[in-house]
Image (spheres, grey):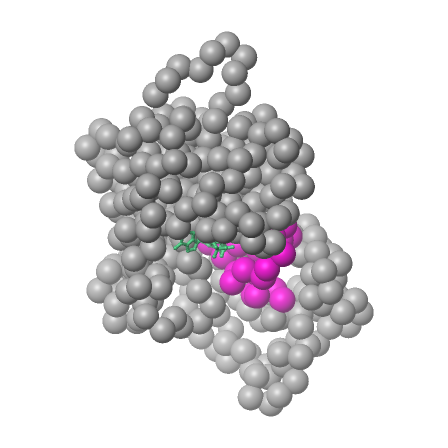
Amino acid sequence: MEMRGVGEKERVCVTGAGGYVASWLVKFLLQKGYIVHGTVRDPCDKKNAHLKDFENASENLQLFKADLLDYEGLCAAIDGCSGIFHVACPVPVGTVANPEVDLIEPSVVGTRNVLNACLKAKAKRVVVVSSVGAVMVNPNWPKDQAMDEECWSDRDSCKTTKNYYCLGKTIAESEAFEYAKRGELDIVTVCPSIVIGTMLQPTINASSLLLLTMLKELIWESDENESMEDKTRHLVDVRDVAEAILLVYEKPEAKGRYICTSYTMKMQALANKLKDMYPNYNYPKSFTEVDDSGKLSSEKLQDLGWKYRPLEESIVDSVMNYEERGLLLKK
Ligand SMILES: NC(=O)c1ccc[n+]([C@@H]2O[C@H](COP(=O)([O-])OP(=O)(O)OC[C@H]3O[C@@H](n4cnc5c(N)ncnc54)[C@H](OP(=O)(O)O)[C@@H]3O)[C@@H](O)[C@H]2O)c1
Protein backbone atom coordinates (compact mmCIF):
# COMPACT_ATOMS: atom_id res chain seq x y z
CA MET A 1 0.00 0.00 0.00
CA GLU A 2 1.33 3.43 -0.88
CA MET A 3 1.71 5.85 2.01
CA ARG A 4 -0.58 8.82 1.91
CA GLY A 5 0.94 12.28 1.79
CA VAL A 6 0.30 14.69 4.68
CA GLY A 7 -3.22 16.06 4.48
CA GLU A 8 -4.17 13.68 1.67
CA LYS A 9 -7.64 12.21 1.97
CA GLU A 10 -8.09 8.48 2.42
CA ARG A 11 -9.28 6.58 -0.64
CA VAL A 12 -11.75 3.74 -0.13
CA CYS A 13 -13.89 1.52 -2.32
CA VAL A 14 -17.53 0.49 -1.80
CA THR A 15 -18.88 -2.41 -3.88
CA GLY A 16 -22.49 -2.21 -5.05
CA ALA A 17 -22.49 1.51 -4.25
CA GLY A 18 -26.01 2.17 -5.55
CA GLY A 19 -27.72 -0.35 -3.23
CA TYR A 20 -29.77 0.40 -0.12
CA VAL A 21 -27.13 -0.04 2.58
CA ALA A 22 -24.21 1.03 0.39
CA SER A 23 -25.86 4.33 -0.59
CA TRP A 24 -25.98 5.38 3.07
CA LEU A 25 -22.41 4.23 3.56
CA VAL A 26 -21.20 6.22 0.53
CA LYS A 27 -23.09 9.27 1.80
CA PHE A 28 -21.46 9.05 5.25
CA LEU A 29 -17.99 8.39 3.80
CA LEU A 30 -18.25 11.44 1.54
CA GLN A 31 -19.52 13.55 4.45
CA LYS A 32 -16.46 12.51 6.44
CA GLY A 33 -14.08 13.54 3.66
CA TYR A 34 -13.13 10.16 2.20
CA ILE A 35 -12.46 9.79 -1.51
CA VAL A 36 -14.82 7.04 -2.60
CA HIS A 37 -14.58 4.61 -5.50
CA GLY A 38 -18.01 3.05 -5.94
CA THR A 39 -18.57 -0.05 -8.04
CA VAL A 40 -21.87 -0.33 -9.89
CA ARG A 41 -22.94 -2.64 -12.66
CA ASP A 42 -23.94 0.26 -14.88
CA PRO A 43 -22.68 3.78 -14.07
CA CYS A 44 -25.14 5.28 -16.61
CA ASP A 45 -28.24 3.58 -15.15
CA LYS A 46 -30.50 6.17 -13.55
CA LYS A 47 -30.92 3.90 -10.52
CA ASN A 48 -27.41 5.04 -9.51
CA ALA A 49 -27.96 8.75 -10.26
CA HIS A 50 -28.75 9.62 -6.62
CA LEU A 51 -25.10 8.98 -5.68
CA LYS A 52 -23.98 12.01 -7.66
CA ASP A 53 -26.23 14.29 -5.59
CA PHE A 54 -24.52 13.49 -2.28
CA GLU A 55 -22.53 16.22 -0.55
CA ASN A 56 -18.89 16.20 -1.84
CA ALA A 57 -19.78 13.67 -4.56
CA SER A 58 -18.77 15.90 -7.46
CA GLU A 59 -15.17 16.08 -6.19
CA ASN A 60 -14.74 12.87 -4.25
CA LEU A 61 -16.91 10.13 -5.75
CA GLN A 62 -15.86 8.11 -8.75
CA LEU A 63 -18.02 5.30 -10.12
CA PHE A 64 -16.49 2.18 -11.67
CA LYS A 65 -18.31 -0.40 -13.76
CA ALA A 66 -17.84 -3.84 -12.22
CA ASP A 67 -19.87 -6.98 -11.84
CA LEU A 68 -18.83 -9.18 -8.92
CA LEU A 69 -17.74 -11.81 -11.41
CA ASP A 70 -15.53 -9.33 -13.25
CA TYR A 71 -12.20 -9.57 -11.44
CA GLU A 72 -10.42 -7.07 -13.70
CA GLY A 73 -13.19 -4.51 -13.23
CA LEU A 74 -12.99 -4.94 -9.46
CA CYS A 75 -9.19 -4.56 -9.55
CA ALA A 76 -9.52 -1.28 -11.44
CA ALA A 77 -11.95 0.06 -8.80
CA ILE A 78 -9.98 -1.17 -5.77
CA ASP A 79 -6.53 -0.15 -7.03
CA GLY A 80 -5.11 2.66 -4.88
CA CYS A 81 -7.65 2.18 -2.06
CA SER A 82 -6.56 1.54 1.52
CA GLY A 83 -10.03 0.52 2.71
CA ILE A 84 -12.59 -1.67 0.96
CA PHE A 85 -16.22 -2.09 1.94
CA HIS A 86 -17.62 -5.16 0.24
CA VAL A 87 -21.36 -4.60 0.34
CA ALA A 88 -22.62 -5.92 -3.02
CA CYS A 89 -24.57 -9.17 -3.06
CA PRO A 90 -27.90 -10.17 -4.57
CA VAL A 91 -30.65 -9.89 -1.94
CA PRO A 92 -33.63 -11.73 -3.39
CA VAL A 93 -37.33 -11.22 -2.86
CA GLY A 94 -38.70 -14.74 -2.47
CA THR A 95 -37.24 -17.68 -4.36
CA VAL A 96 -34.88 -17.41 -7.34
CA ALA A 97 -34.87 -19.58 -10.48
CA ASN A 98 -31.29 -20.79 -10.30
CA PRO A 99 -29.81 -20.35 -6.81
CA GLU A 100 -26.33 -21.53 -7.80
CA VAL A 101 -26.00 -18.90 -10.50
CA ASP A 102 -28.26 -16.19 -9.07
CA LEU A 103 -27.10 -16.29 -5.43
CA ILE A 104 -24.22 -18.58 -4.52
CA GLU A 105 -21.88 -17.60 -7.33
CA PRO A 106 -22.09 -13.80 -6.97
CA SER A 107 -21.94 -14.15 -3.21
CA VAL A 108 -19.03 -16.61 -2.95
CA VAL A 109 -17.02 -16.10 -6.15
CA GLY A 110 -17.82 -12.39 -5.95
CA THR A 111 -16.37 -12.12 -2.45
CA ARG A 112 -13.32 -14.12 -3.54
CA ASN A 113 -12.79 -11.76 -6.47
CA VAL A 114 -13.11 -8.70 -4.23
CA LEU A 115 -10.68 -10.12 -1.67
CA ASN A 116 -8.14 -11.10 -4.34
CA ALA A 117 -8.37 -7.58 -5.74
CA CYS A 118 -7.84 -6.24 -2.19
CA LEU A 119 -4.74 -8.43 -1.86
CA LYS A 120 -3.40 -7.11 -5.14
CA ALA A 121 -4.00 -3.53 -3.99
CA LYS A 122 -2.41 -4.26 -0.58
CA ALA A 123 -5.48 -2.92 1.19
CA LYS A 124 -5.16 -1.85 4.81
CA ARG A 125 -8.53 -3.16 6.00
CA VAL A 126 -11.54 -4.82 4.38
CA VAL A 127 -15.04 -4.75 5.81
CA VAL A 128 -17.24 -7.50 4.41
CA VAL A 129 -20.98 -7.07 4.88
CA SER A 130 -22.36 -10.48 5.73
CA SER A 131 -25.76 -11.13 7.33
CA VAL A 132 -27.40 -12.71 10.33
CA GLY A 133 -28.32 -15.26 7.66
CA ALA A 134 -24.76 -16.52 8.17
CA VAL A 135 -25.44 -16.74 11.92
CA MET A 136 -28.96 -17.91 12.59
CA VAL A 137 -29.64 -21.03 10.52
CA ASN A 138 -28.24 -23.18 13.30
CA PRO A 139 -30.64 -25.74 14.82
CA ASN A 140 -27.95 -26.92 17.24
CA TRP A 141 -27.61 -23.61 19.08
CA PRO A 142 -29.23 -23.77 22.55
CA LYS A 143 -32.71 -22.21 22.27
CA ASP A 144 -32.48 -20.17 25.47
CA GLN A 145 -29.07 -18.71 24.63
CA ALA A 146 -28.73 -15.56 22.54
CA MET A 147 -26.90 -16.17 19.29
CA ASP A 148 -23.62 -14.30 19.19
CA GLU A 149 -20.61 -14.13 16.87
CA GLU A 150 -19.63 -17.72 17.77
CA CYS A 151 -22.76 -19.00 16.10
CA TRP A 152 -22.51 -19.92 12.41
CA SER A 153 -25.31 -21.06 10.12
CA ASP A 154 -25.17 -24.76 9.34
CA ARG A 155 -24.63 -25.29 5.62
CA ASP A 156 -26.64 -28.52 5.47
CA SER A 157 -29.58 -26.87 7.24
CA CYS A 158 -29.41 -24.00 4.73
CA LYS A 159 -29.55 -26.54 1.91
CA THR A 160 -32.39 -28.63 3.34
CA THR A 161 -34.46 -25.52 3.99
CA LYS A 162 -33.51 -24.20 0.51
CA ASN A 163 -32.11 -21.09 2.15
CA TYR A 164 -29.59 -20.39 -0.58
CA TYR A 165 -29.13 -16.72 0.27
CA CYS A 166 -28.03 -17.73 3.78
CA LEU A 167 -25.87 -20.50 2.36
CA GLY A 168 -24.06 -18.06 0.06
CA LYS A 169 -23.53 -15.54 2.87
CA THR A 170 -22.25 -18.28 5.20
CA ILE A 171 -19.73 -19.64 2.70
CA ALA A 172 -18.61 -16.15 1.63
CA GLU A 173 -18.10 -14.90 5.18
CA SER A 174 -16.23 -17.97 6.38
CA GLU A 175 -14.00 -17.90 3.29
CA ALA A 176 -13.23 -14.25 4.04
CA PHE A 177 -11.88 -15.28 7.43
CA GLU A 178 -9.62 -17.81 5.73
CA TYR A 179 -7.85 -14.86 4.07
CA ALA A 180 -7.56 -13.20 7.48
CA LYS A 181 -6.25 -16.41 9.12
CA ARG A 182 -3.55 -16.73 6.49
CA GLY A 183 -2.48 -13.22 7.50
CA GLU A 184 -3.17 -11.98 4.00
CA LEU A 185 -5.74 -9.32 4.80
CA ASP A 186 -7.14 -7.49 7.82
CA ILE A 187 -10.81 -8.42 7.55
CA VAL A 188 -13.75 -7.49 9.74
CA THR A 189 -17.32 -8.54 8.99
CA VAL A 190 -20.67 -7.01 9.92
CA CYS A 191 -23.76 -9.21 10.07
CA PRO A 192 -26.91 -7.06 9.97
CA SER A 193 -30.38 -8.34 10.73
CA ILE A 194 -33.34 -7.12 8.62
CA VAL A 195 -32.54 -3.57 7.58
CA ILE A 196 -35.33 -0.98 7.61
CA GLY A 197 -35.52 2.79 7.22
CA THR A 198 -35.22 5.55 4.64
CA MET A 199 -34.21 4.55 1.11
CA LEU A 200 -31.85 6.87 -0.75
CA GLN A 201 -31.87 4.75 -3.92
CA PRO A 202 -34.81 5.08 -6.35
CA THR A 203 -35.62 1.35 -6.56
CA ILE A 204 -37.24 -0.62 -3.72
CA ASN A 205 -34.86 -3.12 -2.09
CA ALA A 206 -36.01 -6.42 -0.64
CA SER A 207 -35.92 -5.64 3.09
CA SER A 208 -37.84 -2.37 2.70
CA LEU A 209 -40.80 -4.50 1.63
CA LEU A 210 -41.24 -5.64 5.24
CA LEU A 211 -42.63 -2.30 6.43
CA LEU A 212 -44.11 -1.38 3.08
CA THR A 213 -46.23 -4.53 2.84
CA MET A 214 -47.40 -4.07 6.43
CA LEU A 215 -48.56 -0.54 5.67
CA LYS A 216 -49.79 -0.97 2.15
CA GLU A 217 -53.43 -1.83 2.31
CA LEU A 218 -53.66 -3.30 -1.21
CA ILE A 219 -51.61 -6.32 -0.21
CA TRP A 220 -54.17 -7.27 2.41
CA GLU A 221 -57.38 -6.72 0.47
CA SER A 222 -57.79 -10.26 -0.80
CA ASP A 223 -58.89 -12.86 1.71
CA GLU A 224 -55.97 -15.17 1.11
CA ASN A 225 -53.51 -12.54 2.28
CA GLU A 226 -55.37 -11.42 5.34
CA SER A 227 -53.49 -13.74 7.62
CA MET A 228 -49.80 -13.27 8.22
CA GLU A 229 -47.33 -15.51 9.98
CA ASP A 230 -46.44 -14.07 13.37
CA LYS A 231 -42.73 -14.55 12.84
CA THR A 232 -40.03 -13.15 15.08
CA ARG A 233 -38.06 -10.45 13.27
CA HIS A 234 -34.78 -8.81 14.19
CA LEU A 235 -34.61 -5.26 12.90
CA VAL A 236 -32.00 -2.54 12.49
CA ASP A 237 -32.05 0.92 10.90
CA VAL A 238 -30.09 1.34 7.68
CA ARG A 239 -28.26 4.41 9.04
CA ASP A 240 -27.20 2.43 12.10
CA VAL A 241 -25.88 -0.33 9.82
CA ALA A 242 -23.87 2.16 7.74
CA GLU A 243 -22.50 3.66 10.96
CA ALA A 244 -21.55 0.20 12.24
CA ILE A 245 -19.69 -0.54 9.00
CA LEU A 246 -17.77 2.74 9.37
CA LEU A 247 -17.11 2.12 13.04
CA VAL A 248 -15.52 -1.30 12.52
CA TYR A 249 -13.42 0.18 9.73
CA GLU A 250 -12.16 3.12 11.73
CA LYS A 251 -11.59 1.42 15.09
CA PRO A 252 -8.21 -0.33 14.91
CA GLU A 253 -9.23 -2.71 17.72
CA ALA A 254 -12.19 -4.10 15.73
CA LYS A 255 -11.69 -7.80 15.08
CA GLY A 256 -13.71 -10.71 13.69
CA ARG A 257 -17.45 -10.57 13.13
CA TYR A 258 -20.03 -8.16 14.49
CA ILE A 259 -23.73 -8.89 14.68
CA CYS A 260 -25.64 -5.67 13.99
CA THR A 261 -29.22 -5.71 15.24
CA SER A 262 -31.33 -3.42 17.42
CA TYR A 263 -34.86 -4.77 17.97
CA THR A 264 -36.53 -8.15 18.13
CA MET A 265 -40.27 -8.17 17.52
CA LYS A 266 -43.05 -10.50 16.54
CA MET A 267 -44.83 -9.35 13.38
CA GLN A 268 -48.11 -8.85 15.23
CA ALA A 269 -46.42 -6.63 17.80
CA LEU A 270 -44.87 -4.63 14.97
CA ALA A 271 -48.27 -4.28 13.28
CA ASN A 272 -49.75 -3.09 16.59
CA LYS A 273 -46.97 -0.55 16.99
CA LEU A 274 -47.53 0.75 13.46
CA LYS A 275 -51.28 0.86 14.09
CA ASP A 276 -50.75 2.97 17.21
CA MET A 277 -48.61 5.41 15.26
CA TYR A 278 -50.57 5.34 11.97
CA PRO A 279 -54.13 4.15 12.68
CA ASN A 280 -55.46 4.90 9.19
CA TYR A 281 -53.54 2.33 7.21
CA ASN A 282 -54.93 -1.18 6.82
CA TYR A 283 -52.99 -3.93 8.49
CA PRO A 284 -53.06 -7.74 8.34
CA LYS A 285 -56.25 -8.79 10.08
CA SER A 286 -55.01 -11.98 11.65
CA PHE A 287 -51.77 -13.70 12.47
CA THR A 288 -50.91 -17.36 12.59
CA GLU A 289 -48.73 -18.52 15.46
CA VAL A 290 -45.13 -19.50 14.64
CA ASP A 291 -42.71 -20.94 17.16
CA ASP A 292 -39.45 -19.38 16.05
CA SER A 293 -38.28 -17.39 19.05
CA GLY A 294 -34.56 -16.79 18.62
CA LYS A 295 -32.38 -14.40 20.54
CA LEU A 296 -29.62 -12.42 18.91
CA SER A 297 -26.97 -10.29 20.59
CA SER A 298 -25.20 -7.17 19.34
CA GLU A 299 -23.27 -6.75 22.57
CA LYS A 300 -19.88 -7.02 20.87
CA LEU A 301 -20.71 -4.16 18.50
CA GLN A 302 -22.11 -2.06 21.33
CA ASP A 303 -18.94 -2.67 23.34
CA LEU A 304 -17.04 -1.20 20.40
CA GLY A 305 -19.10 1.99 20.76
CA TRP A 306 -22.05 1.36 18.42
CA LYS A 307 -25.34 3.01 19.31
CA TYR A 308 -28.69 2.67 17.60
CA ARG A 309 -31.66 4.95 17.22
CA PRO A 310 -35.14 4.26 18.65
CA LEU A 311 -37.43 2.05 16.54
CA GLU A 312 -40.04 4.84 16.44
CA GLU A 313 -37.55 7.08 14.61
CA SER A 314 -36.92 4.40 11.98
CA ILE A 315 -40.66 3.93 11.51
CA VAL A 316 -41.48 7.66 11.27
CA ASP A 317 -38.65 8.29 8.79
CA SER A 318 -39.58 5.23 6.72
CA VAL A 319 -43.24 6.20 6.45
CA MET A 320 -42.29 9.77 5.51
CA ASN A 321 -39.89 8.41 2.88
CA TYR A 322 -42.55 6.09 1.39
CA GLU A 323 -45.19 8.84 1.38
CA GLU A 324 -42.86 11.39 -0.21
CA ARG A 325 -42.03 8.95 -2.97
CA GLY A 326 -45.64 8.02 -3.62
CA LEU A 327 -45.11 4.40 -2.53
CA LEU A 328 -47.69 4.92 0.16
CA LEU A 329 -50.74 7.15 -0.07
CA LYS A 330 -50.77 9.53 2.90
CA LYS A 331 -53.66 8.75 5.24
N1 LIG B 1 -31.23 -5.36 3.64
C1 LIG B 1 -31.12 -6.27 4.57
O1 LIG B 1 -32.07 -6.56 5.32
C2 LIG B 1 -29.81 -6.97 4.79
C3 LIG B 1 -29.66 -7.75 5.95
C4 LIG B 1 -28.46 -8.39 6.18
C5 LIG B 1 -27.42 -8.27 5.27
N2 LIG B 1 -27.59 -7.51 4.15
C6 LIG B 1 -26.45 -7.42 3.23
O2 LIG B 1 -26.20 -6.06 2.99
C7 LIG B 1 -25.68 -5.90 1.67
C8 LIG B 1 -26.48 -4.85 0.94
O3 LIG B 1 -27.83 -5.27 0.86
P1 LIG B 1 -28.99 -4.22 0.50
O4 LIG B 1 -30.12 -4.48 1.39
O5 LIG B 1 -28.43 -2.86 0.40
O6 LIG B 1 -29.41 -4.76 -0.94
P2 LIG B 1 -29.60 -4.03 -2.33
O7 LIG B 1 -30.18 -2.68 -2.18
O8 LIG B 1 -30.33 -5.01 -3.17
O9 LIG B 1 -28.12 -3.88 -2.85
C9 LIG B 1 -27.38 -4.95 -3.32
C10 LIG B 1 -26.31 -4.41 -4.23
O10 LIG B 1 -25.54 -5.51 -4.73
C11 LIG B 1 -25.37 -5.32 -6.11
N3 LIG B 1 -25.18 -6.59 -6.79
C12 LIG B 1 -25.97 -7.69 -6.75
N4 LIG B 1 -25.46 -8.65 -7.53
C13 LIG B 1 -24.34 -8.14 -8.09
C14 LIG B 1 -23.37 -8.64 -9.00
N5 LIG B 1 -23.45 -9.88 -9.52
N6 LIG B 1 -22.35 -7.84 -9.34
C15 LIG B 1 -22.25 -6.58 -8.85
N7 LIG B 1 -23.13 -6.05 -7.98
C16 LIG B 1 -24.16 -6.83 -7.61
C17 LIG B 1 -26.63 -4.64 -6.59
O11 LIG B 1 -26.38 -4.01 -7.80
P3 LIG B 1 -27.55 -3.76 -8.87
O12 LIG B 1 -28.26 -2.53 -8.38
O13 LIG B 1 -26.83 -3.56 -10.16
O14 LIG B 1 -28.43 -4.98 -8.84
C18 LIG B 1 -26.86 -3.66 -5.44
O15 LIG B 1 -26.09 -2.49 -5.61
C19 LIG B 1 -25.71 -7.28 1.03
O16 LIG B 1 -24.43 -7.86 1.16
C20 LIG B 1 -26.72 -8.03 1.88
O17 LIG B 1 -26.49 -9.42 1.86
C21 LIG B 1 -28.76 -6.86 3.89
Q: Choose between 184 and 16: the one closer to the eye.
A: 16
Furthest toward the top, the residue is 6
Is 293 magenta? The answer is no
Q: Choose between 246 and 14: the one closer to the eye.
A: 14
Instruction: Give percent across and percent down for residue 222.
Output: 62, 88
Residue drawn at (59%, 26%), measured in percent from left and top? 33
Q: Is residue 174 left or right of residue 308?
A: left
Instruction: Give percent across and percent down for residue 274.
Output: 68, 65
Q: Is residue 72 above or below residue 164?
A: above
Furthest toward the left, the residue is 182
Q: Is residue 22 above or below residue 206?
A: above
What span is in magenta? 189-212
Q: Is residue 95 left or right of residue 23?
A: left
Furthest toward the front, the residue is 44
Residue drawn at (19%, 32%), measured in percent from left and top? 182
In this view of the protein, can residue 145 be seen by the observer? no
Residue drawn at (24%, 37%), measured in percent from left and top? 179
Q: Is residue 146 left or right of residue 184?
A: right
Q: Choose between 292 and 13: the one closer to the eye.
A: 13
Furthest toward the right, the residue is 331
Is 198 magenta? The answer is yes
Task: Check the picture and name the quadrant holding the C terminus.
Answer: bottom right
Instruction: Give percent across and percent down for residue 136.
Output: 35, 57
